[in-house]
Amino acid sequence: MMYVIVILSMLCAVLLAWVIHLKGQLRSVSRQLEKRLSKHTHNAISITLMDPDTERMAAAVNRCLEKEEETRLTLERQEKEFRATIANISHDLRTPLTAVKGYLQLLSGTPLDEVQRSRLNIIQRHITELGVLIEHFFEYSFLLSDETELHPETFSLTDEVMECLAAAVPKFEEKGMQVCLAQCDPIRITADREKTVRILQNLIRNGIQHADGNIIVSVRNEASDVRVCFSNPVRQPEQIDLGSLFDRFYTSDKSRRKSTGLGLSIVKLLTERMGGGVFASLEGNVITIGFTLPRQIRQAL
């Protein structure tokens, strides 16, 4: 009887050691998977337990990871091809557009009757709109492939907002719109000035193009960042999908007239590159679109 007890005790001890070792291996696999996610490594999952079932499980996990890596590389290649395509298209379109503008300029200097002059003005207006669309394509493709470092400097965000709005006054007047600065805190930030100006210009262009009334702009301090908002009424607010507003090529205008849907995508890309974020809300027929940027230096002007 004593021998049976001893043998059973030894078997239990071996079994317990096996279970403990097995749990240790499972924890090791979990840590390796978490490391792949957090540190973006591509190492295969390894185990030290000589067990056929566990080895098959690890092999299956590694096959899944290999497939995931292949998919990731395929998507990266397709994205690079897409960027190159957009860049080539925008470049190829710029050349004939420049030639067309030149001939239109020559034509505008020749004697024309009233009907011909009217038609020429229509052509020039559409050519200008086409030029804006091509510039959006070019800018977006450039930003996607731009891997240069940020150039942070300390400047007045408030002044940049005012200067960008002042530069756009002729466009506002042309559309019969006005801009109101509802709240404009004196704010200095440390960020890439050029990219910040691009963000503001794209938001202003978006407002001019889509607003159905006056635009209200606010610049204010928040707890941990700064916030710039553009609010304006819009037509058919029910057609606006806030969740897709900053997506590439999204436009609430299903006919896609005068819009590539790239302006707000550029805003998102630039803002996130500087560690900020974008947001949008809709109350009734008034939409608010804006961005936040981290404030490294908080100093009143």
Image (cartoon, rainbow, N blue to C red):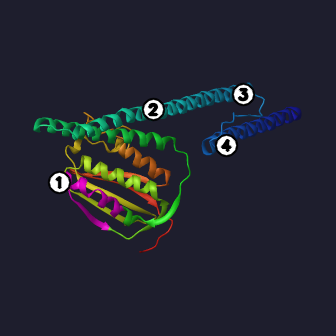
Q: Quadrant of the N terminus?
A: top right
Q: Residue 16, can we see it?
A: yes
Label of residue 11 in the image = none
Marks 1 and 3: in contact by CB < 8 Å? no
Name the kind of residue labelled 2 in the image: Asn
Q: Quadrant of residue 21?
A: top right
Q: Earlier in the sequence, mark 4 or mark 3?
A: 4
Q: Secondary structure at mark 1?
A: loop
Residue on which the image places disc 3: 55
Q: Secondary structure at mark 4?
A: helix
Marks 2 and 3: in contact by CB < 8 Å? no
Q: Nearer the viewer, mark 3 or mark 1?
A: 1
Residue occupying the point 22% across, 40% down: 108
Work out whether residue 265 or residue 59 is closer to the camera in this orientation and state it.
Answer: 265
Work out whether residue 80 or residue 22 is closer to the camera in this orientation and state it.
Answer: 80
Label of residue 31 in the image = 4
Name the kind of residue labelled 4 in the image: Arg
